[in-house]
Each structure stands twice: as C-alpha cells, then as structure tokens.
Image: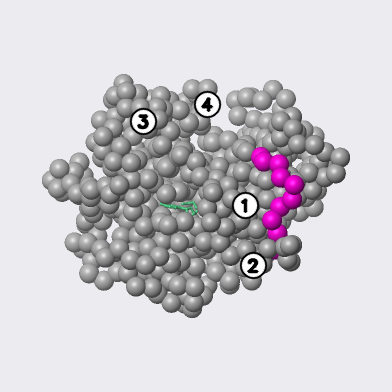
Amino acid sequence: MDYPVIHKPALEDMKVKPNIQDYHESQRDFSWDLLKKELDGLEGGGLNLAYEAIDRHVKKGKGDKVAFYWEGAKGEEEVYTFAQFKVQSDKFANVLQGLGVEKGDRVFIYMDRIPELYFAFFGILKAGAIAGPLFSAFGPDPVKDRLLDSGARVLVTSPNLRAKISGILGDLPDLKHVVVVNKNNRHPEGLQPGDVSYEEAMAGASEEFTIVRTTEEDYDIMHYTSGTTGKPKGAAHVHRAIYQQYATGKWVLDLHEDDIYWCTADPGWVTGTSYGMVAPWTNGITQVIYEGGFGAGPWYRVMEKYKVTVWYTAPTAIRMLMKAGEDVVKRHDLSSLRYMCSVGEPLNPEAVVWGVQAFGMPFHDNWWQTETGAILIANYPIQDVKPGSMGRPTPGITVGILDDNYEEVPTGDEGHLAVRPGWPSMFKTYWGNEEMYNSKFQNGWYITGDKARKDEEGYFWFVGRADDVINTAGHLVGPFEVESALLEHPAVAEAGVIGKPDPIAMEIVKAFVALKDGYEPSDKLRRELMRFARKKLSSFVAPREIDFIDSLPKTRSGKIMRRLLKARELGLPEGDTSTLED
Ligand code: PRX
C-alpha cells in the first residue's frame, strides 16, 4: 500500500522556527568552516569534545542551566547544571590522571544509565583519553572481545556488572584498573580487592583540571560494531566529529535553547553517545536521562513529567508503543511535545502515520551508522514526509546509489548506498584493522553495506543490508559471534545464524544447529543452548529460535551458506547453489 505524503506544516503553525529554515535563509554555499565558528576550540588551539559540550556553556554564563534531569530505575531523581557537570567531569579527569591515564589511552565504561556514566565519559575526554562505552546488557564474551581488542587500560563499572564479568578480568593483560561506582550503595556486595572506589577517589579529587590538549584528529570515542565475519570492529572516531553532531542536532533534531530533549538510546550504542550526549550538549540543551527500561506507560509518564519537547527514539520501540495503543497516550498530557525522530532500523510507513494519529505529528526517520558518526540522511521539519523514506542527505553530504562496480545507477534503481568521504564525523579507522577500514572505500565512495534507492525528488528508501548482519530491535548482530558462542557448547558440531523477519523487532536472531554424535535434539537441549548463549552474550544477541538440523549447507570451501538457510526458512527460491558442497 502507498501512503500519502504528509505535507510539511506551515511555518506559522510551528511552535518555533526550525533551525534548518534559518540555515537555508542565511547561507547560500555550504561550508563546515561556518559551523566551526559557532564552537570555541581550545584556548591556544585544538579541539576537545568535553570542552564544547560542557565547559563552553559555563564560560558563556550558562553554568546554572540544567544539563540533565536524571530519573533512576527506582524513581530516584537528580538534577545537574552545566556548572556541576563541569566539576564532576573535571574531578574524574583528575582521578584518571592519578591512575596514570595518558592521552590516547582507552578507558571503557560498562555501566547502567546513571549520572556517573556521563561524568566518567566526559572526564575521560578531558584527560585526552578515548572513551569506549559498552552496553550494560552485554555478557562476558562481548565485553572481553572489546577490552582485549582495544587494549583498554581502565574499566569503569558497577559492582553488579563487575560480578557478571569477573571471570574475564584475569584475561586482560592491558587492563590496569577497575573503577567501581557503587551509587547510593545500591549494591551491598560492594567492591572486590584491588578495585578503585569511584566514590573515594572522587572525594579526594581536585575540582580544577586543565583539559589535555587534543586536536580535531585525535581519537575520542570508540564503538564496536558487527560485520558478517569475524569479531566486532572498533569504529574509532575523532574530536572533529562534533562539528557534524552539533550541526545535525540543530538541523535534524531541531534543538532550540528552551528544549527538553529525550534520546531513548543507551550510551552503549552510538546513538546514545552522538545524540544522547554530543549533539544535545554541544548545543547547550537540557536533556532527560531515564534509567528505567521500556514501557509505554513509564515512557509517556517521563515525557509528561519533564515536559519533553523533542524526542528521539527507534522503530522497535515505536512499534511496541503502537501495540500498547492510543489509549495509553491519551491518558498523559504530552502537549509539550513538538518534534519526534527515529533511527536505527527501517521505520515502516504505518508507524510514521501512527505518529500523526497518536501525537499529532509524524516520526521523522533518519539514517546513519556507527561508522558515519552522525546523521547523514534525514526527514527535516520543513520538508514533506514520505512515510517509509529515510529522507534526504543533510547539508554537505553527497549520497550515491551504486552498482556492483561502484558506479552510480539511474535514479529509481536499487543499489549500494554510498557516501562521498570527507564528512567531519566520518570514522578514522577500525581499531587495529586498517585493511578492513580501507576495504570500505571504493571508487571514491564510502560503501555503507546497505542497499537503497533514490526517487525523483531525492528521497532515499532503504531496501536491506548487502551482507548477513542482523538488525534486531536496532542492534546490529554479527552471525559469526553468535555461531562462535554456540560452538563452545559441547553438544554443538555446527551452527549457522540468520535474521528472521519479525513484525516488532524487524529481525530476530535464529540459529540452526547440527549436534555432535551422541546428542539428540530435544526441547530441553534447545532451552539449554539458549540459556548458554544468553549468559555468554546477552539476551538480545542470543538466538530467540533454534532449529536442529542434520548438517548445515556449506560451500565447497566449507563456508556456511547463511543465504540458503534464510531462503529455506522463508520459503524463497534458493538462488545460485552451484558452490554448494555435495
Ligand atoms: O542497516 C542500517 C540500519 O542500521 C545500520 C547502522 O547501525 P549502527 O551502526 O548500529 O548505527 C546505529 C545508529 C543509527 C545501517 O547500516 N539503519 C539505521 N538507520 C536506518 C537503518 N535502516 C533503515 N532505516 C533507517 N532509518
């Protein structure tokens, strides 16, 4: 079914004049240099994200403005101004220096969404180190892979999460310190011998800190992302990314001085850093940070309580809210809300239209990736919304659709979604894997790994992934990681993992398992394998479905043909099977 275009509202009907309108009126030629002028840079030269996100506002007299309202999972409330935020991040930078952390060291954060996570994050940047946020739902395997690969020197965590990964800490030769935050003594089990107590270290730390001089090209943040093969790769970003995160915060999220902004993404994922920290705070915006999990009632309550004006969320959450129905929406006063955006997976047209029905405005879909660092394609507030489309390229960005030889295809044809390199938030490398990084650039384009098409009006439409990477509820999962975990179970001889379409999560992780001699398929074994994978990986990475089969289809060179497993699962034609093993 075709969904009619949702026409842009008249400017006079909008609560505020969109920033992108201002931009169009004031600038004829695009230049990143104009944007750079809106930020300060470090005194004496250089650029540091923590300075632009926090200290700059204090220096400009906005120290008393609220940087964030925090609501804990148990209803605890805390409020921090930019001035207080500066003090806490300065103190943590001192703590890190006291532990011997130097410019360029990797410091990872494995924590629930508590204020200390944010203090630590910006303290790391102030100390000139590289911050690596990890999703707190991860099990020991993904945490170990990331800490090992990055050579992390310090881990900041909490007692409950530390306990979850205690088995791997001895396997990390580069890890020198584990800093443990026991907020409000939440975890009576407390610290382990050798841990650094965050609370004690902060109590003794000075509030004065001179930010370590970093440049546009110095690394600041690492996020691991999954590919078809091998372990996750550390997409490493540099401080210059701020220019684009700042700009898209203004143009795409339409952040204004008085906004109360809520990004529902966890900081363990790139959306939670680029748009849950960098974009709003470089724009000096007040945020809401909610530690609790998903729930239609709780989410609307948060929006009502804090009078959220701009909301950035994800398709799976929107589809779950749709399922919960409009009655729940109507029970809350959401009159403050004026703008809604979505990212991370395809946003189905029904969901865009439901936004209008339930909230009086569409969800504005946008597209980007861990590697791109910031939004590159978007539906803007002053543009008609075509439900189902990701929108158009943001200013300064050139997007192409390419054939298999990396040449542009005619408008309307499907092909590889590609971007002309050189945008400020482009990742600088995959940590320790320059070859893989270089392979992403072909014929003068950055190849995203997505397939898409462009229509006559320049709107882009997502078609699918060009590889086997699974997108489950907005989280990318590499089949290889799941297969490797399953293979560690004594009963498993072979495993093949695919994404199975799902009406809510877009895809779920499904595994096909061949058992070793002496093991028989049973529901009990299936449950045991699921539990095994959940414990090692995490509940969202572990398979939700497992089928036992005698043997997996493989190429003659022994590679599992996931494409064939998927075609069989979906009852689709099997395509070219000429390389299939006899
Ligand atoms: O396949 C695309 C999908 O998510 C991938 C990027 O995931 P990640 O690196 O985890 O970055 C998350 C930050 C957005 C893309 O390659 N994706 C992202 N946004 C959309 C999308 N697919 C369809 N529509 C989108 N709007």
Quadrant containing the C terminus is bottom right
* Mark pair 3, 2: CA separation: 55 Å
User: Given this view, does label 3 or label 2 mark the residue nearer the observer?
Assistant: 2
Residue placed under numbered mark 4 in the picture: 73
Image position, residue 277 (x, y; %):
46, 46
Q: Residues within 10 Å of mark 3 (few under 14, many from 20)?
A: many
**Between discs 3 and 2, the one toward the N terminus:** 3
* Mark pair 4, 3: CA separation: 15 Å
Image position, residue 558 (x, y; %):
74, 62
Q: Is residue 540 visible?
A: yes
Q: Is residue 224 visible?
A: no
User: Given this view, does label 2 or label 4 mark the residue nearer the observer?
Assistant: 2
**Between discs 3 and 1, the one toward the N terminus:** 3
Q: Is residue 505 magenta?
A: no
Which residue shows up at 48% across the image and 31% down it?
A: 294
* Mark pair 4, 1: CA separation: 40 Å
Image position, residue 230 (x, y; %):
68, 58
The foreground one among 492 and 62 is 492
